[in-house]
Image (cartoon, grey):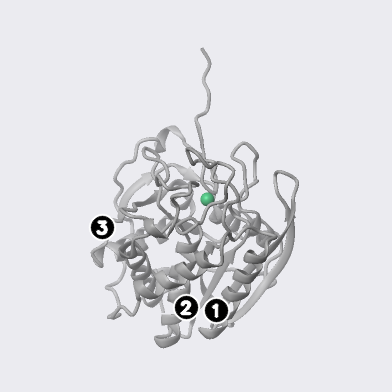
């Protein structure tokens, strides 16, 4: 017999289980947020859904294709239209299978000069192969959930923040990372190429933020968001604060205060490169794994639930207006 570390490879990412995180357990929040600000939610799940739909309508957003470039330009123009200071960070990288691909990280900043900052991110590219599909493993995925959902929520957040701005002392950055999903589980650091590029080439010299929130697969039916292991390690205060907001808003069926295994996702490379405590809101738990549609052709528009988009979006909206005490104004 030999002992073997158990790895679950997946997602955008490789997940590592450790003994203490194998079995989810309840944890008590360590910080009770101040009472939520009287934010009347402007977040529209219909609008978030239409942003999601629009991305899917471009076709597969595979780096290096015309569909990918068209979508990048659209993301940029939407961020601009919503009044953010927008840019496309252009670079290039090489995939695990030796393809040289462009990287377009699309970035929008609100209150660019503010010292206190919150970083929001999601990946916008889609996986070139449905390797978890029972029948179509070489076909690309639509990425309605794995890609478009997080971006849809954040575009809607940008739209409503134009109408009801955050306090001017709080800066917000939205980054749509590219090339997250062209990876292979057996090859280290083969996922998250866009965030790895960004971490080595910050869009602004010495960029930092007080904390970050990554969204990944936030549009599925019956999604469940747990306290992912890496997020809990370096961003426990943010998890505690955000989950409390979600539960106060009545979204405790989505936001469960339970720990689960660690995942390598874009937040990992952001933290590694900048030390920003970034947490991951992701539909994952160690016992069930990722949603059934993950990396299959069923990751399509029919399997999106607007209620999930609403739960996540209204939580982030309230977060922006009532940030953790560490950056409270
Ligand atoms: Zn993926």
Q: Kindly tell me whether residue 32 is visible in this rendering.
A: no
Query: What residue would you read off at disc 3?
Result: 252
N-term mark: 2 or 3? 2
Pointers 2 and 3 in contact (CB under 8 A)?
no
Task: Report, in whole angstroms, how far the alpha carbon at label 3 lies from the one at label 1.
Answer: 30 Å
Crowding at dot 3, Cα within 10 Å, few <14 / some 14-19 / many 20+, comes out as: some
Considering depth in this image, is 58 or 12 the residue closer to the camera? 58
Give x and y (percent) for residue 258: 32, 47
Give x and y (percent) for residue 23: 35, 36
Task: Report, in whole angstroms, how far the alpha carbon at label 2 lies from the one at label 1.
Answer: 7 Å
Q: Quadrant of the C terminus?
A: bottom left
Crowding at dot 1, Cα within 10 Å, few <14 / some 14-19 / many 20+, comes out as: many
Q: Is mark 3 within 8 Å of ligand 1?
A: no
Element under label 1? Answer: helix
Query: What residue would you read off at disc 1?
Result: 79
Give the number of the mark in front: 3 or 1. Answer: 1
In this figure, what is the number of numbered marks?
3
**Residue ID at (54%, 45%):** 130
Tag shown at residue 223: none
Query: What residue would you read off at disc 2?
Result: 158
Pointers 3 and 1 in contact (CB under 8 A)?
no
Pointers 2 and 1 in contact (CB under 8 A)?
yes
Task: Report, in whole angstroms, how far the alpha carbon at label 2 lies from the one at label 3.
Answer: 24 Å
Element under label 3? Answer: loop
């Amino acid at each position: 017999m030999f002992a073997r570390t158990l790895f679950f490879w997946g997602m955008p990412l490789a997940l590592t289980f450790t003994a203490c995180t194998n079995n989810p357990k309840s944890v008590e929040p360590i910080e009770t947020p101040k009472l939520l600000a009287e934010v009347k939610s402007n977040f529209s799940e219909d609008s978030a859904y239409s942003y999601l739909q629009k991305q899917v309508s471009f076709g597969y957003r595979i780096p290096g294709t015309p569909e990918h470039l068209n979508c990048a330009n659209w993301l940029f123009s939407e961020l601009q239209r919503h009044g953010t200071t927008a840019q496309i960070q252009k670079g290039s990288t090489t995939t695990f299978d030796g393809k040289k691909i462009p990287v377009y990280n699309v970035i929008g900043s609100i209150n660019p000069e503010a010292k206190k900052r919150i970083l929001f991110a999601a990946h916008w590219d889609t996986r070139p192969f449905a390797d978890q599909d029972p029948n179509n493993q070489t076909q690309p995925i639509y990425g309605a959930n794995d890609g478009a959902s997080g971006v849809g929520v954040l575009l809607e957040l940008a739209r409503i923040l134009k109408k009801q701005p955050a306090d001017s002392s709080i800066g917000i950055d939205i980054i749509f990372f590219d090339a997250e999903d062209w990876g292979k589980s057996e090859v280290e650091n083969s996922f998250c190429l866009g965030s790895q590029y960004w971490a080595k080439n910050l869009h602004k010299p010495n960029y930092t933020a007080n904390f970050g929130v990554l969204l990944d697969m936030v549009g599925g039916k019956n999604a469940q968001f747990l306290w992912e292991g890496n997020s809990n390690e370096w961003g426990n205060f943010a998890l505690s604060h955000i989950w409390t907001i979600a539960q106060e808003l009545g979204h405790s069926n989505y936001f469960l205060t339970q720990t689960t295994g660690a995942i390598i996702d874009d937040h990992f490379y952001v933290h590694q490169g900048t030390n920003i405590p970034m947490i991951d809101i992701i539909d994952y738990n160690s016992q069930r794994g990722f949603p059934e549609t993950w990396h299959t052709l069923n990751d399509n528009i029919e399997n999106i639930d607007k209620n999930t988009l609403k739960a996540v979006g209204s939580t982030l909206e309230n977060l922006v207006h009532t940030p953790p005490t560490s950056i409270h104004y």
